[in-house]
Image (cartoon, rainbow, N blue to C red):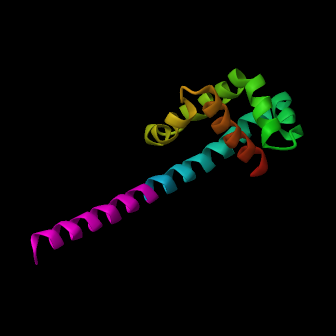
């Protein structure tokens, strides 16, 4: 086997390994998000006013609008839920929840909240 063929094979194997790792991490994060959505819904049941406002929203844009109006309340609920989760699970979703971009944060929190009311 020539050197160039060996390099090509190593490159292909590295790509396959990277894709596998990425797939597993994404799958794990999605599983954690589902757990998070369930726990968020349990907390929202105690916060009837917020739950009713989310349920009244007719589409994703209305949910985002509701989240932006009460962002601190929803962040507090998510923070309480996150504290009950194991550290390794928290680390998987924390970057998305705490992103610097307010628009991105609202988008992600809206996704979690929307999933928490539709999967209940």
Identified at 87% across, 43% down, the residue is 58
The quarter holding residue 49 reads top right
Image quadrant assignment for residue 61 = top right
Q: Nearer the viewer, residue 62 or 54?
A: 62
User: What percent of the width, then of the height, locates residue 54?
Assistant: 82, 36
Would you say 12 lies left or right of 72 here? left
Left or right, 44 with respect to 102, comes to right
Vertical placement of residue 31 versus 110, above or below: below
Residue in front for this viewpoint, 70 or 79: 70
Q: Residue at x 56, y 52 (%)?
A: 30
User: Magenta stretch containing residue 16, yes or no?
Assistant: yes
* Residue in view at x 89 percent, y 38 percent: 56
Q: Main secondary structure of the magenta part?
A: helix
Q: What are the residue bounds of the magenta stretch?
A: 1-23
Whether residue 8 is in magenta: the answer is yes
On the rendered structure, is 57 left or right of 44?
right
**Quadrant of the frame with the N terminus:** bottom left
| Residue 117 sits in quarter | top right
Q: Which residue lies most toward the bottom here?
A: 1
């Amino acid at each position: 086997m020539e050197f160039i063929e060996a390099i090509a094979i190593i490159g292909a194997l590295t790509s396959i390994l990277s894709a596998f790792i990425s797939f597993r991490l994404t799958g794990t994060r999605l599983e954690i998000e589902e757990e998070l959505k369930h726990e968020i819904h349990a907390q929202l049941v105690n916060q009837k006013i917020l739950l009713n406002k989310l349920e009244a929203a007719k589409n994703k844009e209305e949910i985002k609008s509701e989240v932006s109006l009460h962002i601190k309340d929803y962040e507090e609920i998510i923070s309480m839920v996150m504290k009950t989760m194991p550290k390794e699970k928290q680390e998987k979703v924390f970057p998305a929840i705490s992103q610097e971009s307010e628009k991105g944060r609202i988008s992600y929190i809206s996704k979690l909240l929307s999933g928490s009311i539709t999967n209940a």
